Amino acid sequence: MAVHSGRVGFLIIVTILIPIIGAESALELGEVVHLEDSDIGLLGATIDSQNEQVLAYGKNSKIIIINPVNPEDNFDITWNSGFNLTDADYHPSGNTAIIVGESGLVLRYSKETGNVQRVGNFVQFNNDNLESISWNADGSWAYIGSEEGNIWKFRGGIGNSSEVQLISERILSKVTSIDCHEDVNICIVSTISEGIGIIDDSHRINWIGGTNYPWVDINCPEGNSCIAISSENNLGAIELNLDRPFESSLRVTYFDSIFGKLIHVEHQNKDVNLISIVPFALIEFNSTTGDAFSGIEYNDVKEFSASISDEIIISTWGIDKDGGWILTSHGTAIKYNQIILNSNSSLLDFLVIVSFLVIILGIVYSRQIKK
Protein backbone atom coordinates (compact mmCIF):
# COMPACT_ATOMS: atom_id res chain seq x y z
CA MET A 1 0.00 0.00 0.00
CA ALA A 2 2.77 2.39 0.92
CA VAL A 3 4.76 1.58 -2.20
CA HIS A 4 1.65 2.05 -4.34
CA SER A 5 0.99 5.44 -2.75
CA GLY A 6 4.54 6.51 -3.46
CA ARG A 7 4.20 5.54 -7.12
CA VAL A 8 0.91 7.38 -7.43
CA GLY A 9 2.47 10.48 -5.89
CA PHE A 10 5.42 10.26 -8.28
CA LEU A 11 3.10 9.99 -11.29
CA ILE A 12 1.14 13.02 -10.10
CA ILE A 13 4.32 15.07 -9.85
CA VAL A 14 5.58 13.96 -13.26
CA THR A 15 2.23 14.82 -14.81
CA ILE A 16 2.34 18.29 -13.27
CA LEU A 17 5.93 19.08 -14.21
CA ILE A 18 5.94 17.86 -17.82
CA PRO A 19 4.81 20.69 -20.15
CA ILE A 20 1.79 19.66 -22.22
CA ILE A 21 1.71 21.24 -25.68
CA GLY A 22 -1.99 20.57 -26.11
CA ALA A 23 -2.95 22.19 -22.82
CA GLU A 24 -5.26 25.16 -22.40
CA SER A 25 -4.02 28.44 -23.87
CA ALA A 26 -1.81 30.54 -21.56
CA LEU A 27 -2.37 33.67 -23.66
CA GLU A 28 -5.57 35.46 -24.57
CA LEU A 29 -6.30 37.57 -27.64
CA GLY A 30 -7.58 41.12 -27.36
CA GLU A 31 -7.51 44.26 -29.49
CA VAL A 32 -7.50 43.81 -33.28
CA VAL A 33 -6.05 46.33 -35.75
CA HIS A 34 -6.40 45.96 -39.53
CA LEU A 35 -3.53 47.81 -41.21
CA GLU A 36 -5.51 47.98 -44.45
CA ASP A 37 -8.93 46.91 -45.68
CA SER A 38 -7.65 44.02 -47.82
CA ASP A 39 -4.95 41.33 -47.72
CA ILE A 40 -1.61 43.15 -48.14
CA GLY A 41 0.56 40.04 -48.55
CA LEU A 42 3.09 40.47 -45.75
CA LEU A 43 5.90 37.91 -45.53
CA GLY A 44 7.69 39.00 -42.36
CA ALA A 45 8.61 41.82 -39.98
CA THR A 46 11.45 42.96 -37.73
CA ILE A 47 11.70 45.33 -34.77
CA ASP A 48 14.55 47.75 -34.09
CA SER A 49 16.81 47.48 -31.03
CA GLN A 50 15.15 50.49 -29.38
CA ASN A 51 11.68 48.91 -29.78
CA GLU A 52 10.52 52.07 -31.56
CA GLN A 53 9.52 50.66 -34.96
CA VAL A 54 8.43 47.45 -36.61
CA LEU A 55 9.33 47.17 -40.29
CA ALA A 56 6.99 44.79 -42.12
CA TYR A 57 7.66 43.68 -45.71
CA GLY A 58 6.11 41.42 -48.29
CA LYS A 59 4.86 40.79 -51.78
CA ASN A 60 5.31 43.31 -54.59
CA SER A 61 7.83 45.30 -52.51
CA LYS A 62 5.29 46.08 -49.79
CA ILE A 63 6.91 47.99 -46.89
CA ILE A 64 5.03 49.34 -43.89
CA ILE A 65 6.39 50.91 -40.69
CA ILE A 66 4.37 50.13 -37.54
CA ASN A 67 4.37 51.55 -34.02
CA PRO A 68 5.01 48.40 -31.91
CA VAL A 69 2.84 49.63 -29.02
CA ASN A 70 0.00 51.06 -31.12
CA PRO A 71 -0.17 49.43 -34.59
CA GLU A 72 -2.91 51.86 -35.64
CA ASP A 73 -0.01 54.30 -35.96
CA ASN A 74 1.64 53.14 -39.20
CA PHE A 75 2.69 54.36 -42.63
CA ASP A 76 3.55 52.87 -46.01
CA ILE A 77 6.84 53.28 -47.85
CA THR A 78 6.58 53.17 -51.62
CA TRP A 79 9.11 51.21 -53.66
CA ASN A 80 8.04 50.66 -57.24
CA SER A 81 9.02 47.13 -58.19
CA GLY A 82 7.23 43.83 -58.48
CA PHE A 83 9.80 41.89 -56.47
CA ASN A 84 8.84 40.19 -53.23
CA LEU A 85 10.74 41.28 -50.12
CA THR A 86 11.68 38.30 -47.97
CA ASP A 87 13.69 39.46 -44.93
CA ALA A 88 14.96 42.55 -43.14
CA ASP A 89 17.11 43.50 -40.17
CA TYR A 90 17.83 46.79 -38.41
CA HIS A 91 21.44 47.81 -37.93
CA PRO A 92 22.40 47.58 -34.21
CA SER A 93 22.42 51.39 -34.10
CA GLY A 94 18.72 51.30 -34.96
CA ASN A 95 19.05 54.13 -37.51
CA THR A 96 18.73 52.05 -40.68
CA ALA A 97 17.54 48.66 -41.84
CA ILE A 98 18.51 46.47 -44.77
CA ILE A 99 15.71 44.71 -46.66
CA VAL A 100 16.41 41.85 -49.10
CA GLY A 101 14.30 40.21 -51.76
CA GLU A 102 14.04 38.39 -55.04
CA SER A 103 16.67 38.56 -57.80
CA GLY A 104 19.39 40.08 -55.61
CA LEU A 105 17.37 43.11 -54.52
CA VAL A 106 18.81 44.97 -51.49
CA LEU A 107 17.21 48.11 -50.05
CA ARG A 108 18.28 50.43 -47.24
CA TYR A 109 15.60 52.04 -45.08
CA SER A 110 16.45 55.23 -43.17
CA LYS A 111 14.56 55.87 -39.95
CA GLU A 112 15.53 59.54 -40.15
CA THR A 113 14.07 60.20 -43.61
CA GLY A 114 11.46 57.45 -43.73
CA ASN A 115 12.63 56.50 -47.23
CA VAL A 116 14.29 53.53 -48.91
CA GLN A 117 16.99 53.40 -51.57
CA ARG A 118 18.58 50.66 -53.62
CA VAL A 119 21.98 49.42 -52.42
CA GLY A 120 24.44 47.73 -54.77
CA ASN A 121 23.25 45.71 -57.76
CA PHE A 122 21.80 42.34 -58.72
CA VAL A 123 25.09 41.04 -60.12
CA GLN A 124 26.81 41.17 -56.72
CA PHE A 125 24.41 38.46 -55.57
CA ASN A 126 24.32 36.42 -58.81
CA ASN A 127 20.68 37.45 -59.23
CA ASP A 128 19.91 34.98 -56.41
CA ASN A 129 16.65 35.15 -54.52
CA LEU A 130 17.81 36.52 -51.19
CA GLU A 131 16.08 34.85 -48.22
CA SER A 132 17.73 36.04 -45.01
CA ILE A 133 19.82 38.82 -43.49
CA SER A 134 21.24 39.58 -40.05
CA TRP A 135 23.72 42.16 -38.73
CA ASN A 136 26.51 41.00 -36.46
CA ALA A 137 26.75 42.41 -32.93
CA ASP A 138 28.98 45.42 -33.65
CA GLY A 139 27.27 46.27 -36.94
CA SER A 140 30.46 45.92 -38.99
CA TRP A 141 28.95 43.32 -41.36
CA ALA A 142 25.64 41.77 -42.24
CA TYR A 143 25.28 38.22 -43.55
CA ILE A 144 22.89 37.52 -46.41
CA GLY A 145 21.74 34.04 -47.48
CA SER A 146 19.91 32.98 -50.63
CA GLU A 147 17.41 30.42 -51.83
CA GLU A 148 20.12 29.08 -54.13
CA GLY A 149 22.37 28.29 -51.15
CA ASN A 150 24.95 31.10 -51.07
CA ILE A 151 26.02 33.24 -48.11
CA TRP A 152 27.67 36.66 -48.43
CA LYS A 153 29.04 39.21 -46.01
CA PHE A 154 27.72 42.68 -46.78
CA ARG A 155 28.12 46.29 -45.74
CA GLY A 156 26.99 49.52 -47.29
CA GLY A 157 29.33 52.12 -48.68
CA ILE A 158 29.00 55.74 -49.74
CA GLY A 159 25.68 56.53 -51.40
CA ASN A 160 24.16 53.36 -52.77
CA SER A 161 27.43 51.46 -53.10
CA SER A 162 28.19 48.32 -51.09
CA GLU A 163 30.90 45.78 -50.35
CA VAL A 164 29.86 42.18 -50.90
CA GLN A 165 31.96 39.00 -50.56
CA LEU A 166 30.86 35.38 -50.89
CA ILE A 167 31.85 33.42 -47.76
CA SER A 168 30.25 30.01 -48.36
CA GLU A 169 32.78 27.62 -49.87
CA ARG A 170 30.19 25.45 -51.56
CA ILE A 171 26.63 25.68 -52.80
CA LEU A 172 24.33 24.80 -49.91
CA SER A 173 20.68 23.97 -49.78
CA LYS A 174 18.32 26.92 -49.29
CA VAL A 175 19.52 29.27 -46.54
CA THR A 176 16.28 29.82 -44.62
CA SER A 177 17.42 32.05 -41.75
CA ILE A 178 20.42 33.83 -40.24
CA ASP A 179 20.47 35.33 -36.75
CA CYS A 180 23.35 36.91 -34.87
CA HIS A 181 24.20 37.05 -31.18
CA GLU A 182 23.54 40.45 -29.62
CA ASP A 183 26.87 40.79 -27.77
CA VAL A 184 29.55 38.89 -29.69
CA ASN A 185 30.22 38.53 -33.44
CA ILE A 186 28.79 35.03 -33.79
CA CYS A 187 25.93 34.24 -36.17
CA ILE A 188 23.84 31.11 -36.71
CA VAL A 189 22.67 29.81 -40.10
CA SER A 190 19.80 27.43 -40.80
CA THR A 191 19.30 25.55 -44.06
CA ILE A 192 16.77 23.18 -45.58
CA SER A 193 19.03 20.11 -45.62
CA GLU A 194 22.65 21.09 -44.80
CA GLY A 195 21.97 21.56 -41.09
CA ILE A 196 22.96 24.36 -38.73
CA GLY A 197 26.09 26.46 -39.23
CA ILE A 198 28.07 28.87 -37.05
CA ILE A 199 29.76 31.99 -38.52
CA ASP A 200 32.62 33.28 -36.37
CA ASP A 201 34.14 36.78 -36.26
CA SER A 202 36.52 35.82 -39.09
CA HIS A 203 33.54 35.06 -41.39
CA ARG A 204 34.27 31.33 -41.36
CA ILE A 205 31.36 28.85 -41.37
CA ASN A 206 31.40 25.55 -39.51
CA TRP A 207 28.52 23.06 -39.54
CA ILE A 208 27.56 21.60 -36.16
CA GLY A 209 24.88 19.08 -37.17
CA GLY A 210 21.20 18.81 -37.89
CA THR A 211 21.58 17.68 -41.51
CA ASN A 212 18.49 16.44 -43.34
CA TYR A 213 16.15 18.37 -41.03
CA PRO A 214 14.21 21.03 -42.98
CA TRP A 215 15.12 23.97 -40.70
CA VAL A 216 12.92 26.98 -41.46
CA ASP A 217 13.81 29.58 -38.83
CA ILE A 218 16.32 30.38 -36.11
CA ASN A 219 16.47 32.83 -33.22
CA CYS A 220 19.17 33.82 -30.74
CA PRO A 221 17.69 35.42 -27.62
CA GLU A 222 19.76 36.66 -24.69
CA GLY A 223 22.50 34.45 -23.25
CA ASN A 224 24.27 31.63 -25.06
CA SER A 225 21.32 29.59 -26.33
CA CYS A 226 19.74 29.72 -29.78
CA ILE A 227 16.64 27.98 -31.09
CA ALA A 228 16.03 26.47 -34.53
CA ILE A 229 12.75 25.01 -35.73
CA SER A 230 11.94 22.70 -38.63
CA SER A 231 8.84 22.28 -40.77
CA GLU A 232 8.70 18.70 -39.44
CA ASN A 233 8.14 20.07 -35.91
CA ASN A 234 11.66 19.54 -34.63
CA LEU A 235 13.26 21.97 -32.20
CA GLY A 236 17.02 22.44 -32.25
CA ALA A 237 18.50 23.75 -29.00
CA ILE A 238 21.91 25.29 -29.76
CA GLU A 239 24.33 25.87 -26.90
CA LEU A 240 26.86 28.46 -28.06
CA ASN A 241 30.49 28.29 -27.01
CA LEU A 242 31.27 32.00 -27.11
CA ASP A 243 35.04 31.44 -26.80
CA ARG A 244 35.21 28.59 -29.31
CA PRO A 245 32.14 29.01 -31.56
CA PHE A 246 32.87 25.90 -33.63
CA GLU A 247 32.56 23.78 -30.47
CA SER A 248 28.94 24.84 -30.05
CA SER A 249 26.48 21.96 -29.74
CA LEU A 250 23.05 21.10 -31.14
CA ARG A 251 20.36 18.97 -29.50
CA VAL A 252 17.28 18.07 -31.57
CA THR A 253 13.91 17.13 -30.07
CA TYR A 254 10.55 16.42 -31.67
CA PHE A 255 7.20 17.96 -30.72
CA ASP A 256 4.83 15.03 -31.18
CA SER A 257 1.59 16.63 -29.97
CA ILE A 258 1.29 19.64 -32.27
CA PHE A 259 -1.65 20.27 -34.57
CA GLY A 260 0.01 21.99 -37.53
CA LYS A 261 3.57 22.95 -38.53
CA LEU A 262 6.17 25.21 -36.96
CA ILE A 263 6.92 28.25 -39.12
CA HIS A 264 8.60 31.04 -37.05
CA VAL A 265 10.39 31.56 -33.75
CA GLU A 266 10.90 35.01 -32.22
CA HIS A 267 12.22 36.37 -28.95
CA GLN A 268 9.60 38.04 -26.75
CA ASN A 269 11.30 38.93 -23.45
CA LYS A 270 14.18 37.63 -21.34
CA ASP A 271 14.30 33.88 -22.05
CA VAL A 272 10.76 33.52 -23.43
CA ASN A 273 10.26 32.81 -27.13
CA LEU A 274 7.09 32.43 -29.18
CA ILE A 275 6.99 29.73 -31.84
CA SER A 276 4.34 30.33 -34.51
CA ILE A 277 2.35 27.48 -36.02
CA VAL A 278 0.14 27.15 -39.09
CA PRO A 279 -2.83 26.91 -38.71
CA PHE A 280 -2.88 29.87 -36.30
CA ALA A 281 -1.39 28.86 -32.92
CA LEU A 282 1.57 29.73 -30.68
CA ILE A 283 3.93 27.83 -28.38
CA GLU A 284 5.80 29.49 -25.52
CA PHE A 285 9.34 28.15 -25.22
CA ASN A 286 11.72 28.99 -22.39
CA SER A 287 15.28 28.79 -23.73
CA THR A 288 16.76 28.63 -20.21
CA THR A 289 14.67 25.79 -18.76
CA GLY A 290 13.81 24.07 -22.04
CA ASP A 291 10.11 24.03 -21.14
CA ALA A 292 7.45 24.37 -23.84
CA PHE A 293 3.87 25.38 -23.14
CA SER A 294 0.78 26.04 -25.18
CA GLY A 295 0.59 29.77 -25.86
CA ILE A 296 -2.55 30.00 -27.95
CA GLU A 297 -4.52 27.00 -29.21
CA TYR A 298 -6.05 27.04 -32.69
CA ASN A 299 -9.52 26.27 -31.33
CA ASP A 300 -9.31 29.30 -29.03
CA VAL A 301 -8.32 31.49 -31.99
CA LYS A 302 -11.18 30.10 -34.04
CA GLU A 303 -13.61 30.87 -31.21
CA PHE A 304 -12.16 34.40 -30.98
CA SER A 305 -12.44 35.01 -34.74
CA ALA A 306 -13.02 32.44 -37.47
CA SER A 307 -11.57 34.77 -40.11
CA ILE A 308 -8.38 35.49 -38.15
CA SER A 309 -7.88 31.75 -37.50
CA ASP A 310 -7.48 31.29 -41.28
CA GLU A 311 -4.67 33.86 -41.47
CA ILE A 312 -0.93 33.06 -41.20
CA ILE A 313 1.27 34.49 -38.46
CA ILE A 314 4.33 36.22 -39.94
CA SER A 315 5.70 37.94 -36.82
CA THR A 316 5.26 38.50 -33.08
CA TRP A 317 6.82 41.00 -30.69
CA GLY A 318 6.58 41.66 -26.98
CA ILE A 319 5.80 45.08 -25.50
CA ASP A 320 6.16 44.05 -21.85
CA LYS A 321 6.69 40.86 -19.89
CA ASP A 322 3.00 39.91 -20.09
CA GLY A 323 1.94 40.87 -23.60
CA GLY A 324 2.62 41.93 -27.15
CA TRP A 325 1.30 41.79 -30.70
CA ILE A 326 0.83 39.14 -33.38
CA LEU A 327 1.01 40.18 -37.05
CA THR A 328 -0.48 38.14 -39.90
CA SER A 329 0.17 38.03 -43.63
CA HIS A 330 -3.16 39.80 -44.24
CA GLY A 331 -1.96 42.77 -42.22
CA THR A 332 -3.98 42.03 -39.08
CA ALA A 333 -2.37 42.91 -35.76
CA ILE A 334 -3.82 41.13 -32.71
CA LYS A 335 -2.83 41.99 -29.16
CA TYR A 336 -2.08 39.12 -26.77
CA ASN A 337 -1.78 39.05 -22.98
CA GLN A 338 -0.97 36.47 -20.36
CA ILE A 339 -4.14 35.03 -18.88
CA ILE A 340 -4.48 36.23 -15.28
CA LEU A 341 -4.77 33.24 -12.99
CA ASN A 342 -8.04 33.00 -11.09
CA SER A 343 -9.35 30.89 -8.25
CA ASN A 344 -8.76 27.76 -10.32
CA SER A 345 -5.02 28.37 -9.94
CA SER A 346 -5.45 28.23 -6.18
CA LEU A 347 -6.99 24.79 -6.58
CA LEU A 348 -4.06 23.71 -8.75
CA ASP A 349 -1.61 25.00 -6.14
CA PHE A 350 -3.51 23.04 -3.51
CA LEU A 351 -3.35 19.85 -5.59
CA VAL A 352 0.39 20.28 -6.09
CA ILE A 353 0.90 20.61 -2.33
CA VAL A 354 -1.30 17.56 -1.71
CA SER A 355 0.68 15.50 -4.22
CA PHE A 356 3.94 16.34 -2.46
CA LEU A 357 2.38 15.34 0.86
CA VAL A 358 1.26 12.04 -0.68
CA ILE A 359 4.85 11.27 -1.66
CA ILE A 360 6.23 12.20 1.74
CA LEU A 361 3.59 10.19 3.60
CA GLY A 362 4.11 7.26 1.25
CA ILE A 363 7.87 7.23 1.88
CA VAL A 364 7.39 7.50 5.65
CA TYR A 365 4.76 4.75 5.68
CA SER A 366 6.86 2.40 3.54
CA ARG A 367 9.83 2.82 5.89
CA GLN A 368 7.66 2.02 8.90
CA ILE A 369 6.45 -1.18 7.26
CA LYS A 370 10.04 -2.25 6.53
CA LYS A 371 10.90 -1.73 10.22
Image: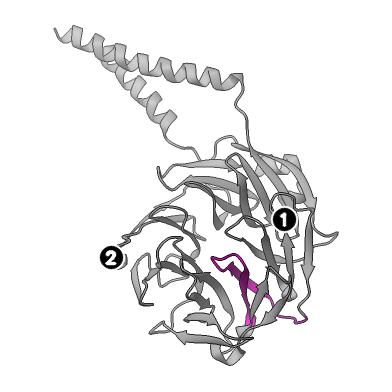
- Name the quarter where the N terminus is drawn: top left
- In magenta, the rendered stretch is 80-102
- Name the quarter where the C terminus is drawn: top left
Q: Residue furthest right?
A: 37
Q: Are marks 2 and 1 in contact (CB under 8 Å)?
A: no
Residue 130: x and y in percent read 57, 78
Residue 6: x and y in percent read 30, 18
Residue 334: x and y in percent read 72, 48
Q: Which residue is mark 2?
A: 244
Rendering quarter of residue 200: bottom left
Residue at image location 39% in from the left, 70% down from the top: 197
Q: Is residue 92 magenta?
A: yes
Q: Residues within 10 Å of mark 1 (few under 14, many from 20)?
A: some
Front-most of residues 325 and 11: 325
Position above or below: 320 against 193: above
**Does residue 331 appear left or right of residue 97 in this picture?**
right
**Does residue 306 appear left or right of residue 37 in this picture?**
left
The answer, for residue 41, to whether it is visible in the render is yes
Work out whether mark 2 precedes mark 1 in sequence or the reverse, and give the earlier one.
1
Amino acid type at circle 1 is: Asn
Amino acid type at circle 2 is: Arg
Q: Which residue is mark 1?
A: 67
Front-most of residues 343 and 325: 325
Position above or below: 17 against 9: below
| Real-space Cα separation, disc 2 to disc 1, in angstroms | 39 Å
Residue at image location 48% in from the left, 16% down from the top: 350
